[in-house]
Amino acid sequence: MYLDLFKLHELPFRLSPDPQFLYLSKQHARAKAYMESTIWFTDGFVVITGEIGAGKTTLIETFLRELQGDVVVAQINQTQLSPTAFLQTVLVQFGFSPFNMKKPEVLATLNQFLTDQHANGRKVLLIIDEAQNLSARVLEEVRMLSGVETTKEKVLRIILAGQPELNDKLNSHELLQLTQRVRLRFHLSALTREETSSYIEHRLEVAGSQGRRIFDEETYPIIFKYTGGTPRLINTLCDTSMMSAFGRDRDTVGVDDVEAAIRELQWSEFISGTNRMRAPTLDSARNSQFHQGQHSVGRILLASEGTTVVERELKPGRLVIGRTPDNDLQIDSKFISRHHCQIITQADSCLIEDLNSTNGIYVHSKRVRRHNLNDGDVVQVGQHEIMYIDERVPRLRAAIDPAEPADSEIPEES
């Protein structure tokens, strides 16, 4: 690898959540303070949300590393569970083997454990990462657990962490009682342009740069432009850029190395409001097929209850679909996530991709992560349907021999 060339003692941009490399921006410091408050206050949930790769898991690992010995922790990362399986998983974290227990026994064991820990002067903390995947039924179980109390206080502290779709769930009417118990809610936003530069330098320093400049100053604006300040994306782009410089036997990373990494990763420019920005094409400013003025290669019809409500042309580029106004196509529905899916159109293909939405996208009644669209495909998105029409497919009228009169009839089959 490139460690010897850059005189580093470890890889600076690994994607694994290593607390040693945590860069505490103002946003991250505030989120960490909210987490720490759960140790002293037991009167409600703390909810931390952030886009994919914003640093939530690294923040949690740092927070856990700094806890005192009198705190007993259950950390749940697998959240696509039934209510009973979820409760069993919590018990496993506390050292039990509950898999032959029925739900009443599981609940009784949990209640007894919590009250015993409190009586012995210990604090019990439940952290649920990727909480946006919890079903409403499981979230109701979480609420019920939060109700275990002595005569003076609650005995279980709870932190829910997840992607922005978690807020969508918490705001739903069916979870009103749980939402009323949320004491602090904080959204972890991306790094600013200045913080992005400091983040890169911080990780290089931890890895052993000793103040040496490894990335040219001119590379920072480009890195921010393509990552939007999202830590995970910064790590990916910086690591690939260093590999590019290593391949050229250079101990500094220049603009040409970053541009080579962007081409290799096949990234497009970051979309404001979402970090789901990868595309199988290069930056639109560098790829002629994405220039303005291209002809439409297709269109979509958005329908609700069988009635078309929106028709939209598809030109080479990206169309982001979601519930909030910052999307290219807004669908104002509680069944649609903030950024639900995207359609990536090229000169010769069109692909729809789920953006880790809560309710997903469906083709032929099957949930899909991504799907290459063919003429006439219908994609189920929440309670809406999207029909794709490929303008490059010859229509019946165009297929008729132009030598025939325009009003000629096609003979019926006998």
Image: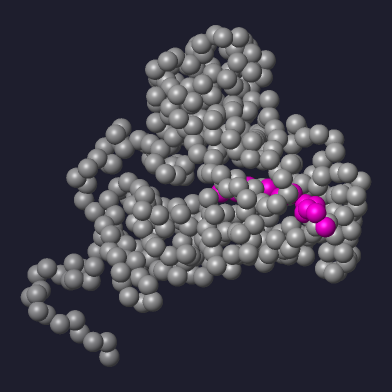
Q: Is residue 54 magenta?
A: no
The vertical placement of 108 against 47, above or below, is below
Q: Where does the image place residue 197, in percent across and percent down from the top left?
A: 48, 22
In screen coordinates, is 118 left or right of 244?
right
Q: Where does the image place residue 303, in percent across and percent down from the top left?
A: 35, 70
In screen coordinates, is 33 left or right of 113?
left
Q: Where does the image place residue 192, in percent across and percent down from the top left?
A: 45, 30
Q: Which residues are magenta?
A: 151-163
Q: Quadrant of the N terminus?
A: top right
The vertical placement of 259 against 149, above or below, is above
Residue 283 seen by the camera: yes
The vertical placement of 98 against 287, above or below, is below
The vertical placement of 222 against 281, above or below, is above
Residue at left 85%, top 38%?
A: 70
Residue at left 51%, top 21%?
A: 198
Q: Quadrant of the C terminus?
A: bottom left
Residue lying furthest front:
152
Residue 233 seen by the camera: no
Along the line of sight, the residue nearer the viewer: 74 or 248: 74
Residue at left 75%, top 31%?
A: 66
Along the line of sight, the residue nearer the viewer: 251 or 20: 20
